[in-house]
Image (cartoon, rainbow, N blue to C red):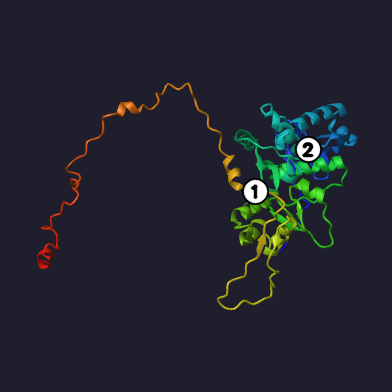
Amino acid sequence: MTNTPDTKLDTTQSKNEDRFTILPDGLIAYQPQKDNPLPGPSVARLRAGAHWLIPDYDFIGESLAALKIEEDEMKSKLKAWMKEHIPSLLPFAKENPETPENLKSLLAKIADEGGIAERAELDLPELTSEERFFLRSQGLRLGPVHIYYHQMLKPAPLTLRALLWATHEGLKHPLPYPRAGVTSYSWPENVTPDTRVQHWFGYPLYGRRACRVDRIDKIICDVYDSAQKGVFSVKNTWAEWLGCGVEDVCTILDTLGHTRTTPPIDPNAVLDEGAEKPTIDYRLRVDKKPFKNNAENARTRAPKKFDKSSDKKPFDKSSFKGKSKKRNDQSRPPKKKFGEETPLTNNPFADLKEMIK
């Protein structure tokens, strides 16, 4: 059974006194009653603004008249809510004053891509352990294929990100959002997916299968960890991570540039009793430096800091000179001198000495 995109979208409500809800079709609902869980009437529609993170609005006069709220007042309420709502879900929408200077251009590029970017498209500098730790502390994952904020894979940030971008690009709403929790899904043969939309969903296309970026990076990490002399075998675990078949995983590996060295397996072939299931072998792509997962693990640790002003005295070897510990003579037998014979009186083979005389 293949997973298909779901057109339903959970609404995201404000935690403020002003209760707005962004609907999948780009409408913005307003609920004036605090105890009413329903979204309320639609008061505005999103439209493209100066930047995809700064949308503009077309207000619905009939709804404002029914609520007895002037357009300027509603516009002020909505802008104040959006100014708080967008950074709460999209971590890159707010500048961090503690960002190191040499990382600002990198983070700006990732922000332009919506918090998820392909590693090959970025000019990634050589990062120190302190810089890597800072990026990790901001929720940024440096994968072998993608660099992304892990928060962006949650349903609410993912849908808001895609909705704002699609509005800025003038795309029709609602978009075919993936269901929450799905790690990959395939498209019907009569539907042509949009590669740009899939990127902004966080589910890039590999053939006709859309895969969540964290699962792709997890598979490629395992590929490089398990490869021996540039060759690796496809694991059933990878198919389980994506919820698909092994041949679908092979299509993804082909798209990523790895070379298959064994022919396709006939799914209808009958194996002999006791025969092992044939493996699918691949050769790593050679036009790219292999990803070193050990370096990825090392950046999760904070750099050590040593306090030189400590009052602790350094170790002094001279204080132990001439104070060697005396050995307890009763705990060990005395050392034998060279040529000294061990007495055999208590030995079970003591009579052997008399027999060989």
Assign a secondary structure to mark 1: loop
Q: Which of the pair 35/101 is nearer the observer?
A: 101
- Residue occupying the point 73% across, 59% down: 254
Give x and y (percent) for residue 62: 89, 36
Tell me the CA gap for discs 2 and 1.
Answer: 25 Å
Q: Are marks 2 and 1 in contact (CB under 8 Å)?
A: no
Indicate which label's residue lies in the foreground, 2 or 1: 1
- As displayed, is residue 110 above or below residue 247? above
**Residue situated in front as seen by the camera: 356 or 78:** 356
**Left or right: where 15 falls relative to 334:** right
- Mark 2, Cα crowd under 10 Å, few <14 / some 14-19 / many 20+, is some
Question: Where, by quadrant of the figure, is residue 50 drawn?
Answer: top right
Left or right placement of residue 308 versus residue 316 in this view: right
Mark 1: amino acid: Phe
**Element carrying mark 2:** helix
Identify residue for label 1.
291
Q: Amino acid at mark 2?
A: Asp
In the picture, which quadrant includes the C terminus?
bottom left
Q: Position of residue 300 (x, y in %)?
A: 58, 39
- Assign the N terminus to one quadrant of the image: bottom right
Residue 7 seen in this snapshot: yes
Give me the disc on residue 112.
2
* Residue 314 sits above or below residue 25 on the image: above
**Quarter of the rendering containing residue 75:** top right
- Mark 2 or 1 closer to N-term? 2
Q: Residue 73 placed where, x, y %?
A: 84, 26
Q: Is residue 35 visible?
A: no
